């Protein structure tokens, strides 16, 4: 981006930690002004400090993506500050793992609770809906927008103990395809990234045996890094990616091949 061009404006949800943090930093490095949204306000502010210290432009905001009113107010604040919104990266996410039914010695001893199911759906599915619905009127008025949402390879092949998360991530694929159809005529593209096994803080709690098995099932022989996903977001968000619409891009080192 040359200095004569207006910077593009990107919102990154869940931008305070992990993949979202790497994404906010990557977009800032690429010349975007970044709105870092997170439920964890301090984490979002820390990311903004890192961006501004490096000479970039960013604002932090506490947004709970599961609340439509938070998303609408967040959009208003970004428009007030920057006058437009070019990119929405729907990255905020949570997990609350549990088996549909837990069986011990042939007896059902537990189950995923309705609250556990709903909580993950509220953030990972409804949160994506809320943020997208909040930004789209601005994007339609500009006749330009890039919506990139986070699915997961588990949406394609399932995962033990993740009925809730898989349901949400499969739903993100469906919504992305609907939006690609509904919004393409307004210069807005909708795509999703499906990360594979990514080495975030969450991975530290994975037993070594499981970790090694995951690597073994990844043809490139390593775990992904947050930056691998950030690069995919950046690519799909680019102006020149205007003919990529409704795509689900697996970024997983090849682990879904053959599934
Ligand atoms: P990952 O490993 O996928 O990057 P993290 O847990 O590190 O996962 O990051 C997810 C981010 O999403 C965190 O910064 C978290 O605070 C944020 N987040 C979780 N729930 C919400 C929510 N309801 N609204 C906004 N941000 C959220």
Image (cartoon, helix red, strand yellow):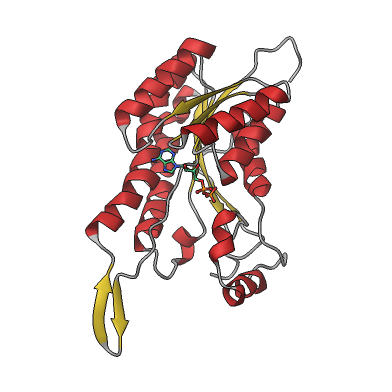
The quadrant of the image that shows the N terminus is top right
Residue located 37% across and 52% down the image: 168
Q: Position of residue 111 (x, y in %)?
A: 26, 70
Residue located 42% across and 55% down the image: 95
Residue located 39% across and 68% down the image: 161
Where on the picture, by quarter, is residue 48? top right
Is residue 225 rendered to the left or right of residue 62?
right
For residue 43, above or below residue 185: below
Residue at the extreme front: 42
Q: Position of residue 144 (x, y in %)?
A: 52, 21
Is residue 131 rendered to the left or right of residue 213?
left
Q: Position of residue 237 (x, y in %)?
A: 60, 33
Residue at the extreme bottom: 105
Whether residue 70 is visible: yes
Q: Position of residue 186 (x, y in %)?
A: 46, 23
Whether residue 83 is visible: no
Q: How many marks?
A: 0
Where on the picture, by quarter, is residue 196? bottom right
Instruction: Please state which of residues 163 and 98 is positioned toward the viewer in this rendering.
Output: 98
For residue 20, above or below residue 155: above
Instruction: Please state which of residues 186 and 229 is positioned toward the viewer in this rendering.
Output: 229
């Amino acid at each position: 981006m040359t200095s004569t061009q207006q910077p593009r404006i990107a919102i990154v949800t869940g931008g305070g930690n992990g993949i979202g943090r790497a994404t906010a930093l990557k977009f800032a490095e690429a010349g975007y002004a970044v709105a870092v949204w997170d439920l964890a306000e301090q984490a979002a502010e820390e990311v903004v400090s890192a961006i501004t210290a490096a000479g970039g432009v960013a604002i932090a905001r506490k947004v709970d993506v599961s609340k439509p009113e938070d998303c609408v107010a967040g959009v208003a604040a970004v428009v007030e500050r920057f006058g437009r919104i070019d990119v929405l990266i729907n990255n905020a996410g949570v997990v609350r793992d549990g088996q549909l039914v837990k069986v011990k010695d042939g007896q059902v001893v537990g189950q995923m609770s309705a609250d556990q199911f709903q909580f993950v759906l509220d953030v990972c599915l409804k949160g994506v809906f809320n943020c997208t619905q909040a930004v789209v009127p601005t994007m339609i008025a500009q006749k330009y927008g890039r919506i990139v949402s986070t699915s997961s390879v588990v949406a394609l092949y399932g995962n033990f103990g993740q009925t809730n998360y898989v349901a949400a991530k499969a739903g993100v694929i469906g919504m992305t395809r609907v939006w690609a159809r509904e919004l393409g005529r307004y210069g807005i593209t909708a795509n999703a990234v499906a990360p594979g096994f990514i080495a975030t803080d969450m991975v530290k709690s994975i037993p070594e045996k499981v970790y090694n098995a995951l690597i073994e099932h990844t043809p490139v022989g390593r775990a992904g890094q947050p930056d691998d996903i950030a690069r995919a977001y950046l690519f799909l968000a680019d102006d020149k990616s205007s003919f990529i619409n409704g795509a689900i891009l697996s970024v997983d080192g090849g682990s879904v091949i053959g599934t």
